[in-house]
Amino acid sequence: MNGLMISTVYNPYTQRHRLLWFLSAMMLSISNVSAQTLPQDTQLGHICYSDGDEQEISADTALWLARMIDGETYGHPTKVEANTMLWAIAQLSAVRKTKRNLTWKLDKLAQLYSQPINHKWTRSGRKCKRYYAKDFDGKIPGNCSKKKVKRRENNRSKPWKELAPIARQSVLKFAKGDSINSAIGVQGWYASGLWYRRDKKNINTREHKLFHSKIDNNVFYTRTKSPATNNWDGFEVTIVATDSFCPMIIDLPSKQGSD
C-alpha cells in the first residue's frame, strides 16, 4: 500500500517528556494567575531576625517591593536579579533596625532605598521640587529631569497588575517563604557603571562595601565592617510562611579547654 507510514510504537521517554512539559506549563499558568491579583495579608508570611524580632509582610509591603523591582529594572527583571534585590532589602533591614532612628520596615525601606520609587526624587520631593517652583528659571539637573521625575511618579502609582510578571511572582514566592537566599549578607546594589567609578576612587573600600556579584546591570555588595555581613551564614534573616514559626537560633558557648 502506498502512502505515509505512521509509527505507532510506544516511546515511554517521549510520553514522559510530554507529561513533564504539560505539568510545567500548568504550574506556570497557575503561578501567573495567582500573581495577577494583589495577595491578602493572611496569605503572606513574615521575616524572622536572629535576635528574635519578627516583621510581618503585608500586602502593601508586597506591592512596594514589586514596584521597587519593576522600577529598578525598567520593567524587565530576571528571576535572579529580582530575588537578589528582595533578600538585599530584607538583610539591610536587619542591620538598620539595630541603629537608632533608622527606617527598617520593608515597605518604607524599599521606598527610601530605591530611587525609582523614592518620593524625594519626584517633582514634589525635597531633592527636585525647587527645580519645579514657579520662580525657577535655571537648568534642571539630570537626576531631576522631567522625564525622570515623571517615571518615578508613575512607578510609585503603578497598580499590582501592571507590574512586571517576574516582579510579582518573585515577591509572592519571597513573601510566602518559598525563596532561597542566594545572596547571603548582601546589603544593596549600584548600577554597574557607578560601582566601577566608585571603585576607581576607592570609595567602596572606604565605605566597607565588598563586591558580591554582578547581575544584569547591577553590582550587589556585602559589608566588611559595621557589621561585617560578608561573614553571615544565612540565619540572620529568614522568611517563613504565614502558618509557620520563626526558627529558634541558639548561640552555644564555645568549649574552653577540656573536662
Image (spheres, rainbow, N blue to C red):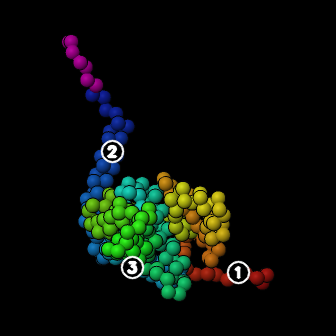
Residue 161: horizontal and vertical position, in percent?
A: 26, 62
- Could you tell me the amino acid type at mark 1? Ser
Q: Is residue 239 visible?
A: no
Q: Is residue 235 magenta?
A: no
Quadrant of residue 166 within the rendered picture:
bottom left
**What residue lies at 54% left-to-right and 73% top-to-bottom?**
235
The Cα atoms of the two marked residues, 2 and 3, are separated by: 36 Å
* Tag count: 3
What residue does disc 2 label? 21
What residue does disc 3 label? 56
Figure quadrant of the C terminus: bottom right
Q: Is residue 78 above or below residue 62?
A: above
Mark 2 and mark 3 in contact? Answer it, CB < 8 Å.
no
Of 134 and 81, nearer the camera is 134
Of 219 and 8, nearer the camera is 219
- Could you tell me the amino acid type at mark 2? Trp
Residue 97: horizontal and vertical position, in percent?
A: 51, 82
Q: Decide which of tag 2 and tag 3 comes sooner along the chain.
A: 2
Helix or strand or loop: what does disc 2 sit on?
helix
Q: Left or right of 18: which side holds 79?
A: right
The stretch in magenta equals 1-7
Mark 1 and mark 3 in contact? Answer it, CB < 8 Å.
no
On residue 254, the disc is 1
